[in-house]
Amino acid sequence: MCRLINRKNNVFEKSLIALVLLSYIQAFNDGNKRTTRIVSNAILIANQYCPVSFRTIDAVEYKKAMLIFYEQNNISVFKDIFIEQFRFAVKTYF
């Protein structure tokens, strides 16, 4: 997973892949989604981009998008949410 992320040149792609893959492997007993959002945002911040908060997305929609990734190996729904939330952050905070 780290090699896959590090091979990507696009910061947004790195951040998104880290977010979904770290959530998928469930590395911790608790706090997997919170931890992966921190890692994803750390990638953005380290590259001079603003963090994404996912605060305007319905929790059910977030979970549905993650389940689609988990069960169908389809990242497109979550990617759309990620892009929408990043645009919201830029528009709202900057």
Image (spheres, rainbow, N blue to C red):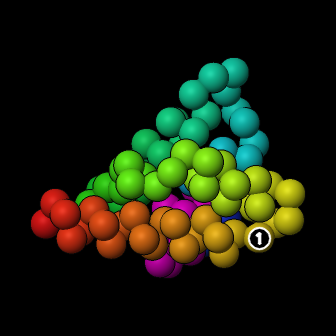
> What is the magenta range?
8-18
Q: Where's residue 51, x and y in %?
A: 32, 55
Q: Where's residue 15, x and y in %?
A: 49, 62
Look at 42% across and 71% down and name the residue there: 84
Answer with left or right where residue 13 lies relative to residue 47: right
Look at 64% across and 70% down and name the residue there: 77
How many labels were placed on the picture? 1
Question: Magenta span has 7?
Answer: no
The quarter of the rendered structure image containing the C terminus is bottom left
Q: To which quarter of the image does residue 59 belong?
A: top right
Q: Where's residue 12, x and y in %?
A: 45, 71
Answer with left or right where residue 34 lies relative to residue 23: left
Q: Where's residue 71, x and y in %?
A: 86, 57
Outermost residue, top direction? 29
Residue nearest the observer in this picture, 68 or 48: 68
The quarter of the rendered structure image containing the N terminus is bottom right
Q: Which residue is mark 1?
A: 74
Answer with left or right where residue 42 lies relative to residue 58: left
Outermost residue, left direction? 94
Task: Say what secondary structure mark 1 lies in.
Answer: loop
Q: Give the vertical position of 89 relative to 67 (above or below).
A: below
Observer able to see residue 71: yes
Look at 52% across and 66% down and name the residue there: 81
Residue nearest the observer in this picture, 4 or 21: 21
**Mark 1 surroundings within 10 Å by alpha-carbon count, few (fewer than 14), some (14 through 19), many (20 or more):** some
Answer with left or right where residue 42 lies relative to residue 16: left
Look at 73% across and 47% down and name the residue there: 24
Residue type at tag 1: Asn
Residue nearest the observer in this picture, 24 or 58: 58
Look at the magenta stretch and give its main secondary structure: helix
Residue nearest the observer in this picture, 60 or 10: 60
